[in-house]
């Protein structure tokens, strides 16, 4: 396992992060299975675990909390808030009212007195940066969080938050958690230059592109992944964007074979090769998934392999921009870029 500094925090984290989104109802993962995955991940050298309040509506945090009991001090623990937690209109977002309340709920579910990294799950356009950063700064001073970060923020919102922190003398985001993979490279054109400029650590989620780069999605084979069952429209080959992804996967599989790598090793090695990226978040649903992904822990791609990837999916290009959460709405909805 390799380790890198998490932005400018001075904290060293593994280049593979254990993501717990599949723990609980979503991934049909029991406590026994979750604990076995955590045990194997820690034994392999992973030292950062990432979860969120909304993963299976709190169940993921509960499973993580039980799995790490008795060894909290050896783990960099991260969670997130901001996505809806039920139907109540104020049980979401990045207001002071909600963050203060929901952090206490997360701490209770995790069975800890603090988290190392508390992240705003999505940018909340209804709440000012000053409001959010002020609340996070106070929670940090209270000892309930060590650092705070953002997740899937557009580049311009990261810049705005940096300036709000300076203007109001508040704590700043120290990390960003964007979606990034060989098939979704758009952040190379805007988000990653900003994170490098401001020294933010980058924890990349979905490095296997929702299973497209897991080796389970290949031409001539029926697609039977758990994600394809949950979101079938994202794997419908009648959609030209999905067919383009499959074509790219087939070409990437050839590159991997010629390099003596699995497609998973190629995909994770690509993400961690970018100088702006700290770590890639893996989200195994089973212990077998974890072992296949841990095989990439020491993967270093050669320049020739990286050049071959660039020839298949050009730098800065998203093959499925409509699936990105940080795409400006005006790029997806023509009415937003046409004066009435």
Image: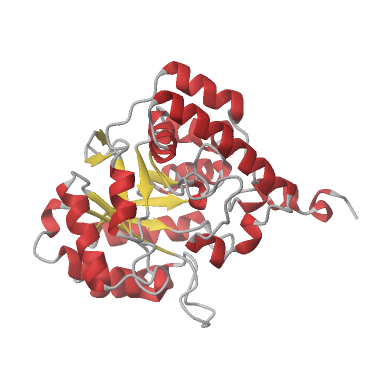
Q: Is residue 101 left or right of residue 43?
A: right
Q: Residue at x 11, y 55 (%)?
A: 73
Q: Is residue 112 at all visible to an observer of this figure?
A: no
- In the depicted structure, whether residue 155 falls above or below residue 274: below
Q: Residue furthest front?
A: 220
Q: Residue furthest left?
A: 70
- In the depicted structure, whether residue 106 falls above or below residue 253: below
Residue 29 appears at what percent x and percent y? Answer: 33, 70
Along the line of sight, the residue nearer the viewer: 284 or 69:
284
Tell me how many marks there are. Answer: 0
Along the line of sight, the residue nearer the viewer: 77 or 230:
230
Q: Is residue 321 left or right of residue 304?
A: right
- In the depicted structure, whether residue 21 falls above or below residue 280: below
Q: Residue at x 24, y 41 (%)?
A: 13
Q: Quadrant of the N terminus?
A: top left
Q: Residue furthest bottom?
A: 88
Q: Is residue 160 at all visible to an observer of this figure?
A: yes
The answer to which quarter of the image holds residue 57 is bottom left
Residue 45 appears at what percent x and percent y? Answer: 18, 44
Q: Residue at x 58, y 56 (%)?
A: 222
Q: Residue at x 58, y 64 (%)?
A: 231
Q: Is residue 136 left or right of residue 47?
A: right
Q: Is residue 69 left or right of residue 41?
A: left
Residue 264 appears at what percent x and percent y? Answer: 41, 41
Q: Quadrant of the C terminus?
A: bottom right
Residue 283 appears at what percent x and percent y? Answer: 37, 55
């Amino acid at each position: 396992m390799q380790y890198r500094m998490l932005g400018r925090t001075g904290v060293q984290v593994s280049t593979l992060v254990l993501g717990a989104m599949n723990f609980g109802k979503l991934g049909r993962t029991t406590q026994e299975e979750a604990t076995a995955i955590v045990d194997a991940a820690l034994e392999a050298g992973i030292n950062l675990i990432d979860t969120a309040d909304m993963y299976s509506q709190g169940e993921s945090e509960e499973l993580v909390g039980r799995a790490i009991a008795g060894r909290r001090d050896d783990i960099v623990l991260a969670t997130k808030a901001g996505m809806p937690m039920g139907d109540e209109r104020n049980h979401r977002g990045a207001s002071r009212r909600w963050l203060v309340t929901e952090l206490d709920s997360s701490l209770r579910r995790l069975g800890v007195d603090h988290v190392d990294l508390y992240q705003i799950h999505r940018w909340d356009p209804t709440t000012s940066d000053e409001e959010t950063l002020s609340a996070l700064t106070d929670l940090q001073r209270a000892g309930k969080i060590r650092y705070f970060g953002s997740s899937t923020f557009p580049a311009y919102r990261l810049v705005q938050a940096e300036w709000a922190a300076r203007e109001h003398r508040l704590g700043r985001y120290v990390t960003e958690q964007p979606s990034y993979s060989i098939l979704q490279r758009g952040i190379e054109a805007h988000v990653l230059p900003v994170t490098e400029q401001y020294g933010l650590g980058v924890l990349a989620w979905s490095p296997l592109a929702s299973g497209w780069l897991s080796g389970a999605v290949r031409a001539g084979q029926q697609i039977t992944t758990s994600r394809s069952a949950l979101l079938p429209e994202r794997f419908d080959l009648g959609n030209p964007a999905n067919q383009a992804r499959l074509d790219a996967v087939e070409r990437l599989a050839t590159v991997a074979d010629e390099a003596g790598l699995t497609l998973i090793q190629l995909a994770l090695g690509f993400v961690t090769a970018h100088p702006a990226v700290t770590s890639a978040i893996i989200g195994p649903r089973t212990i077998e998934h974890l072992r296949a992904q841990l095989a990439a822990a020491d993967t270093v791609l050669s320049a020739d392999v990286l050049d071959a990837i660039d020839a298949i999916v050009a730098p800065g290009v998203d093959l499925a921009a409509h699936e990105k959460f940080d795409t400006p709405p005006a790029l997806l909805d023509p009415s937003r870029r046409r004066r009435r």
